[in-house]
Amino acid sequence: MSAEILNIGQAAEASGISAKMIRHYEDVGLVPPASRTFSGYRTYNHRDVHMLRFIRHSRDLGFSIKQIGDLLSLWRDQNRPSRKVKSMAIEHIAMLDRKIQELSVMKSELARLVSCCHGDARPDCPILDGLAQNKIA
Amino acid sequence: MSAEILNIGQAAEASGISAKMIRHYEDVGLVPPASRTFSGYRTYNHRDVHMLRFIRHSRDLGFSIKQIGDLLSLWRDQNRPSRKVKSMAIEHIAMLDRKIQELSVMKSELARLVSCCHGDARPDCPILDGLAQNKIA
DNA sequence: GCTTGACCTTCCAATGATTGTAAACTTTAA
DNA sequence: TTAAAGTTTACAATCATTGGAAGGTCAAGC
């Protein structure tokens, strides 16, 4: 359970990142190469798992691999100015907002079309007509 | 300008779908193979451009290529029941809603962390601490 | 006729994050 | 000892889109 040294499956379990993705993150350089046992199995300690969890939470918040790389650098830099982290986060919030906006526009436009469609056995359909029109909305 | 027969560049211009993507849609079978000139250039007529615009509007509303294929089938089927189209649209709205929800959760969680961070030259940063914690929120 | 530039053709590859598969090896437990 | 479960690598697929390279075609100007 609380063993010092974990293999990749246990690290995956403990961090919430699949073994597959842990290897992938190593491949692309997001995490440093793991230590290996004599037979070649990757090993992870408590610090490694902590880092993987950091990555997982960052992904859960929608940061890209590239951005998470930057966040990890800041995390490791004991002298970073918190200003840098905050501005990254604020910019990311703005990006999330833009995406939410985009999706909301799609949704309301589609909802408008849906509200015009009786939706029965008859073939005439304002939704298809709307999609075929030169301009939507 | 209003020529009967367009080449792929003109069709792209008229439909709002890049020439690159028009070829791609042909490759994956979303649109039928275009007619060709003697020398091999693709040609598009008014009906083709109409179809491309249908595709473009469907993409603008976030439908996948697969879904657009289904919508095109319904569009072409003069006997479709509008019920089918409406249920597809409603399901898609639900999917958009789920995505919006996801992003909203990300946003509010990140906003919470941001609000805790003074964001100056000092290194202590609740955002990084939050990301490193075992559980967010 | 010839050149130039803008267009078109096909094919191959990359993006970004993740998943799947396959063949071979190691560990663990019965 | 053997079977199951876990690990290793490498390669491919997903989704929609973009980029590039190498070559053919078309229209204009000289």
Image: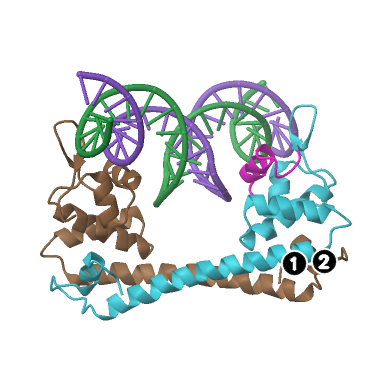
Chain colours: A cyan, B brown, C purple, D green
Could you tell me residue D29's position as x and y percent?
26, 36
Q: Quadrant of residue B27?
A: top left
Question: The disc labelled 2 sits on which kind of residue?
Answer: Cys
Q: Is residue A21 magenta?
A: yes
Could you tell me residue A106's position as x and y percent?
39, 70
- The residue identified by callout 2 is B125
Q: Nearer the viewer, residue A72 or B15?
A: B15
Q: Residue at (60%, 69%) from the top-left corner?
A: A94
Q: Nearer the viewer, mark 2 or mark 1?
A: 1
Q: Residue at (83%, 69%) from the top-left corner?
A: B120
Q: Is residue B2 left or right of residue A26?
A: left
Residue B133 visible in the current orientation: no
Q: Is residue B124 left or right of residue B70?
A: right
Q: Nearer the viewer, residue A128 or A120?
A: A128
Q: SS of the residue at dot 1?
A: helix
Q: Chain of mark 2?
A: B
- The residue stretch that appears in magenta: A17-32
Q: Residue at (79%, 72%) from the top-left corner?
A: B117
Name above or below for residue A91 compared with residue A78.
Answer: below
- The residue identified by callout 1 is A86
Name above or below for residue B25 compared with residue B96.
Answer: above
Q: Mark 2 and 1 residues: CB-CB less than 8 Å, in contact?
A: yes
Tags 2 and 1 both on a single chain: no
Could you tell me residue B86's position as x and y percent?
26, 72
Residue B136 visible in the current orientation: yes
Could you tell me residue B91's position as x and y percent?
35, 69
Q: Nearer the viewer, residue B107 or A51?
A: B107
Q: Quadrant of residue A114?
A: bottom left
Question: The disc labelled 1 sits on which kind of residue?
Answer: Lys
Q: CA distance from mark 2 to mark 1?
A: 8 Å
